[in-house]
Image (spheres, rainbow, N blue to C red):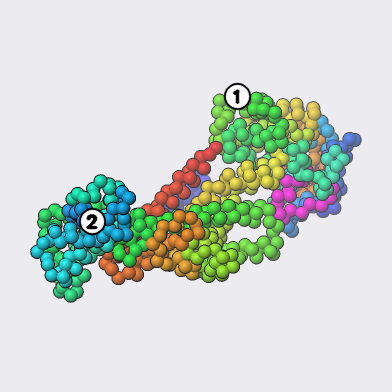
Amino acid sequence: MSKKNLSLSTQQKVRKSLSSRYKKETLFQYFGLSSLSVGIIFLVIFFYSVLSQGFSAFTQTYISLKVDFSDNLVVKNNKIDSIDSNFDAIIRSALRERFPEVNNRRDRRELYKLISIGAVYQLIDHLDMSPGDVGSREILSFPTSSDVDMYVKGNIDRKLDESKRTISNNQMMWIDELVEKGEIKMKFNSALFSNGDSREPELAGIYSALKGSFLMLFITLIVSFPVGIAAAIYLEEFAPKNKISDLIEVNINNLAAVPSIVFGLLGLAVFINWFGIPRSSPLVGGLVLSLLTLPVIIISSRAAITAIPPSIKEAALGVGASHMQVVAHHILPLAFPGMLTGAIIGMSRALGESAPLLMIGMVAFIVDIPSVITDPSSALPVQIYLWADSPERAFAERTSAAIIILLGFLLTMNLLAIYLRKKFERKW
Amino acid sequence: MTARDNIEDIETIGNPNVENPFISAKNVNVHYGDNHAIKDVSLQIAKNQVIALIGPSGCGKSTFIRCINRMNDTIDIAKITGKISLDGEDIYSKELDPVILRARVGMVFQKPNPFPKSIYDNVAYGPKIHGLAKDRNELDEIVANSLQKAGLYEEVSDRLDESGLSLSGGQQQRLCIARTIAVNPEVILMDEPCSALDPIATARIENLIDELSEKFSIVIVTHSMQQAARVSQRVAYFHLGRLVEVDDTEKVFTNPSHILTQDYITGRIG
Ligand SMILES: Nc1ncnc2c1ncn2[C@@H]1O[C@H](COP(=O)(O)OP(=O)(O)OP(=O)(O)O)[C@@H](O)[C@H]1O
Ligand SMILES: [Mg+2]
């Protein structure tokens, strides 16, 4: 009887406490949900502002013009002589022909400014591709200057006073006419992906920076991943546990928190001044970023190794595996997904770094595309910084576009990390 | 009553020594930091013999058998003193390679610890690293044979490439036994090998122990008096790190000398 009472009262106690327990759980869930929403809202705002600003940079305005290849071209040995030929004049005469009413010199100069100075290269490329066009008349489309591009994209307020606009009343009139007649087209902005940096926004591209970043990450990966894993395995498995190894451990943890600009200074002193590696090159950039990534990889690799239950190690030792065999056959494969995750996190951080690159001369105006790792090059975040610093409205658009590309790069890397982790986890 | 309380300076009762010792431990002490887990234990083990270690939980049975294949080397805080020899060779001498020792002295751990690999690879791992099989066929044979002896083959023969971790606890225990015998060791240390097995599987393992003891030495830790009585020729009773009594199995179970041994096997402690 008394036993029954006791169990009843236990049940009642449980019942009583139950509602408050559930209340706590619900409260916690709401708390988690609201923190998540705050995070997502900021993310959406960020993506919206970057995407809405940056997407227009992926298109470029073109003007269709009828050009006359019978004049101004000098042909020597069946080839067009690019020194004696006057390509500028071809474009100018095409513009004059299109707008015959413009005849004073000042207005004509304004007229010529509609077309990008890069249009000349397009003309040269066209003649290289189809030399048979010499002597005939062709309709070609040329990229406009960035001011025209901005105007067509609606980024310039036409109600503003003429002196406050980068585009004159006359130019506005001509463009409006061209738009009306359908002689203005929007095309994919391939220059953004195939050119290096330029002072002219419509010619500026991120290819140099993209390739620079890619080469740099490649060097970072091949330097810091093997070194980091080897260091982690040595520290976890072989290093004697004493004061010295404790000191090393503390230092590695410290290194992960050192401001990245310090690594840049170190790179300047060691890699450039001492080893004589060329400034602004992906090689020196990659080495500096390796220093930055190394502690991250070591720490995460060590964590991955410690997470392996010691019973696995004992099992292998128990059947007579040597220490090195235990490491190679069991510890490394089991810890590898964790090591990989650490490496990708480190690499993502390296991809976004710009401060240390300031110190080694990568914040430079680089027009050429790097072809080897010792060529001067730029990097994505540095390019973003440089463009964000430029006053032209067209560069603001390109800054956002570069951010979109950087984010795409990061997303690809992280997806790759997830894919590789899944793949290695299912190995056996 | 005094004998129960005053175990700090007791001598081992019975016959710790044998005529032709294969394993011989002399004055072995183990410290885990400040914890003195094995206190001055001397014990000899003959070839072709099964010795059962019994005693209450935490008395140092696992610690003692882990000294015999130097498994305690992996525990940083463990300090081992005294002398243990295998076939006349000091196993803690500098010249002796623990890799060779562990190939000769196999171990089945208290907690099943299969590798996160396939069932096949679990058993094949030892033979592979020691180069015991000439080719794949021979390896297949060793694996099948070992699984058969451990009484697991029928259950897993059609899924050898599945993960060892997908097996039940008892199956994992038998997998670990198969992995140990695949290397063909001369001594097998078994730490409660049947703790998760049903009576049928237990009977199979006990048969295996009988069979193996024709050639090899076996040290088995068990909490089952019946099992100790069934499989062993000698029994050693440990208490709080001391070897209290060791003698022929029949003698210990029918006529234990020490009061602690009596208490334990009659169920008053442990
Ligand atoms: N890795 C370790 N580190 C520190 N102390 C340990 C370690 N392993 C065992 N000990 C201690 O050594 C003593 C003996 O433990 P041991 O595992 O040998 O007991 P046991 O007789 O095998 O017990 P059980 O029957 O429960 O398995 C215990 O006091 C335990 O706390
Ligand atoms: Mg134990």
Q: Is residue A123 visible?
A: yes
**Which residue is labeled 2 in the image?**
A142
Where residue A194 sits, quadrant-wise, is: bottom left
* Image location of residue A299, percent across then percent down: 56, 58
Q: Secondary structure at mark 1?
A: helix
- Which residue sits furthest left? A101
Magenta stretch: give its range: B67-84
* Image location of residue B186, percent across then percent down: 78, 34
Left or right of residue A72: residue B212 = right
Where residue A249 sits, quadrant-wise, is: bottom right
Q: Amino acid at mark 2?
A: Phe
Q: At 19% from the left edge and 71% from the top edge, which residue is drawn?
A: A165
Please tell me which residue lies in front, A388 or B241.
A388
Q: Quadrant of the C terminus of chain A?
A: top right
Which mark's residue is nearer the viewer, 2 or 1?
2
Is residue B80 one of those drawn in magenta?
yes
Q: Chain of mark 2?
A: A
**Which residue is labeled 1 in the image?**
B154
Q: At 17% from the left edge and 53% from the top edge, which residue is drawn?
A: A66
Q: At 11% from the left edge and 56% from the top edge, which residue is drawn?
A: A180
